[in-house]
């Protein structure tokens, strides 16, 4: 442990005045001790240990059930460095305003000092954080989500002593006194007034994306909101793919994909490396290499079942902390979309009596599970390799009923960055209250980029210049619908059929036709053996409509105007080139 760490902890203790300071070491004995403490104080509810061994339930305050994006700030010294897509607060104002809320905030409570490592031990990718918190729930979740305790301090000692200062306090859980602050130039995070995951587990989005993206820009790598999976082909070779998807777009399901029987019988296999975060660095071989910096999964529970994600269901059957799900009389949990039918009686996510006739959700729509990644049946044998895995392809995916075909390939790295920059997705009723509302979410990083997004795109372009063998970039859309409003593509495990074409393209094969969008597979390029997808349906899935893209190009132009001079010229060039290609395609259509 360094003197810098000790001095910082003493400084925070003097401000917050806890009754007790506890340094977490990450041991199994400590886990049992902290869990018993959490159960005794009502922070956790012990579940049926025969049916769900090692599992516990937590109920958060009804006002504290999701990320508070409107209360999340980037406190860069210059407002322009924050960018138009983030909330900005001047560092001096932030420290004065929120610092006052921390004074005496831990009196009568225990301060937990949580050293944690993001990334595999000994890896050049990995970063150390120290989280100070007065929440035992946070300490136990950080133990699952990161490599917590002595392993982090050992890495800190051997890698120069730099760490991210992460200060978290529950406060009074008032939304009026809730702030999540990021100081990118100081490598520091403050969060108060929330005990919810993304607001309180500061290794999650706060460090792994907002702070890490800023560090990555300075150090020459990428911190991305991306899954990582490995696909082993019948030939025996394995290709690694990353994918950026906004919420409700099947990201976790893809990360834990189970091959359908016909492809499994052929020898296809899918490995999970990570379901949410990817840190990527250019390798000496000219390829892009990636690690999953997390040690656990913090997933949305509703809709998770043996049909939608059997690997997730197996993962969360033990040693899991559930948050805001329903509790059944037998001490097990339930949520909407569970394998089991609704229970006749249960306690809902707030602890109130619930029946199917209650007219309210049993589990909160954003209820969560925290589970060790090592328990996932599909976890890759090399998921903790300090060197990472080499990336063959990058996917940008979102939910679009029309406009975007099932899959298409970018024409170059620069064009691929443009595809990520223009990513947009239609919201669902559960997420936004209105189906089909289009939301811009570049690289699925809109809530998570820690600096000006125009500069972020420029950094992507610079990283590409270092790569002699860059990954191919693809846009995917599992959610295209027909005239009847039903999905045209079966999705879930059958998405492997699309990944097979992606891998073919990466290895120099795979039939494709050049369109004004990019390279689109031919009708016969994607294997449909064993699924009910006709030629007519396939034509609909792959159709690129010229008329639809007039409005799409116009909307992209309006979005880019927000960035002014910070918009990289290559992105502007790609936008103008798309506009010209759409115009040419329209002329050919009308005058053929």
Image (cartoon, rainbow, N blue to C red):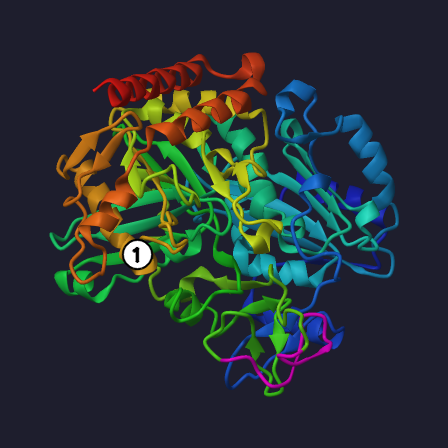
* Residue 286 as seen in the image, left or right of residue 304: left
From the viewer's side, name the closer residue of 262 and 299. 262
Q: Quadrant of the C terminus?
A: top left
Question: Which quadrant holds residue 359?
Answer: bottom right
Q: Is residue 558 magenta?
A: no
Disc 1 designates what residue? 271
- Residue at the location (65% across, 53% down)? 66
Asked whether residue 388 appears in the rendered view, the answer is no
Q: In the rendered image, which quarter is residue 88 located in?
A: top right
Estimate how packed mark 1 is, as few (under 14), some (14 to 19) or many (20 or more) residues with alpha carbons within 10 Å.
Answer: many
**Along the horizontal axis of the image, is 134 left or right of 454?**
right
What stretch of residues is rendered in magenta?
A: 341-357
Queried whether the magenta region covers residue 355, the answer comes back as: yes
Q: Secondary structure at mark 1?
A: strand
Give the left or right position of residue 469, taking residue 109 as reference.
left
Q: Position of residue 68 (x, y in %)?
A: 69, 46
The residue that appears at 38% across and 54% down in the rendered structure is: 484
Q: Position of residue 264 (x, y in %)?
A: 19, 63
Is there any visible trace of residue 437 in the rendered image? yes
Please say if 428 is above or below 317. Answer: above
Q: Main secondary structure of the magenta part?
A: loop
Q: Position of residue 169 (x, y in %)?
A: 76, 51
The residue at 54%/49% (across/down) is: 435
């Amino acid at each position: 442990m360094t003197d810098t760490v000790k001095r910082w902890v003493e400084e925070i203790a003097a401000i917050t005045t806890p009754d007790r300071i506890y340094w977490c070491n990450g041991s199994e004995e400590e886990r049992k001790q902290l869990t018993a403490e959490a159960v005794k104080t009502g922070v956790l509810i012990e579940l049926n240990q025969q049916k769900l061994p090692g599992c516990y339930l937590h109920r958060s305050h009804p006002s504290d059930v999701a990320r508070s994006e409107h209360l999340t700030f980037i406190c860069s010294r210059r407002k322009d460095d924050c960018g138009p897509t983030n909330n900005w607060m001047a560092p001096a104002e932030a420290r004065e305003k929120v610092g006052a809320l921390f004074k005496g905030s831990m009196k009568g409570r225990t301060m937990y000092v949580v050293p944690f490592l993001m990334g595999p031990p000994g890896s050049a990718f990995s970063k150390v954080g120290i989280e100070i918190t007065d929440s035992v729930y946070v300490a136990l979740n950080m133990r699952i989500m990161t490599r917590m305790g002595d392993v982090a301090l050992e890495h800190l000692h051997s890698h120069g002593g730099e760490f991210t200062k992460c200060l978290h306090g529950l406060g009074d859980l008032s939304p009026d006194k809730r702030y999540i602050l990021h100081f990118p130039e100081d490598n520091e995070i403050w969060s108060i007034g929330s005990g919810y995951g993304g607001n309180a587990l500061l290794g999650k989005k706060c460090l792994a994306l907002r702070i890490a993206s800023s560090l990555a820009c300075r150090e020459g790598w990428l911190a991305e909101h991306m899954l990582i999976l490995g696909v082993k082909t019948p030939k025996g070779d394995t290709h690694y793919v990353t994918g950026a998807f906004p919420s409700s777009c099947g990201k976790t399901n893809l990360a834990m994909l189970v091959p359908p029987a016909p492809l499994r019988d052929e020898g296809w296999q899918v490995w999970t490396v990570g379901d949410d975060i990817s840190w990527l660095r250019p390798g000496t071989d000219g390829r892009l290499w990636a690690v999953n910096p997390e040690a656990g999964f913090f997933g949305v529970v509703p809709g998770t079942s043996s049909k939608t994600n059997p690997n997730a269901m197996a993962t969360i059957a033990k040693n899991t902390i559930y948050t805001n799900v329903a509790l059944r009389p037998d001490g097990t949990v339930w949520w909407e979309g569970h394998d089991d039918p609704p229970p006749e009686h249960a306690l809902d996510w707030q602890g109130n009596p619930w029946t199917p006739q209650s007219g309210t959700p049993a589990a909160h729509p954003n209820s969560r599970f925290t589970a060790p990644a090592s328990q996932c049946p599909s976890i890759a044998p090399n998921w903790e390799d300090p060197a990472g895995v080499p990336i063959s392809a990058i996917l940008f995916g979102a939910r679009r009923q029309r406009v975007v075909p099932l899959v298409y390939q970018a024409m170059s790295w620069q064009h691929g960055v443009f595809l990520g920059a223009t990513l947009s997705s239609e919201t669902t009723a559960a997420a936004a209250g209105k189906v089909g509302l289009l939301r811009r979410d570049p690289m699925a990083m809109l809530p998570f980029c820690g600096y000006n997004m125009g500069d972020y795109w420029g950094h992507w372009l610079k990283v590409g210049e270092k790569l002699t063998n860059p990954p191919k970039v693809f846009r995917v859309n599992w959610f295209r619908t027909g005239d009847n409003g039903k999905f045209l593509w079966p999705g879930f495990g059958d998405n492997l059929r699309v990944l097979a074409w992606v891998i073919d393209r990466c290895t120099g094969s795979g039939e494709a036709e050049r369109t004004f969008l990019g390279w689109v597979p031919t009708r016969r390029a994607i294997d449909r053996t064993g699924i009910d997808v006709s030629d007519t349906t396939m034509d609909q899935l792959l159709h690129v409509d010229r008329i639809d893209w007039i409005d799409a190009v116009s909307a992209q132009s309006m979005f880019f105007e927000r960035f002014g001079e910070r918009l990289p010229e290559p992105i502007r060039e790609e936008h103008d080139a798309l506009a010209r290609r759409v115009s040419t395609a329209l002329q050919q259509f009308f005058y053929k």
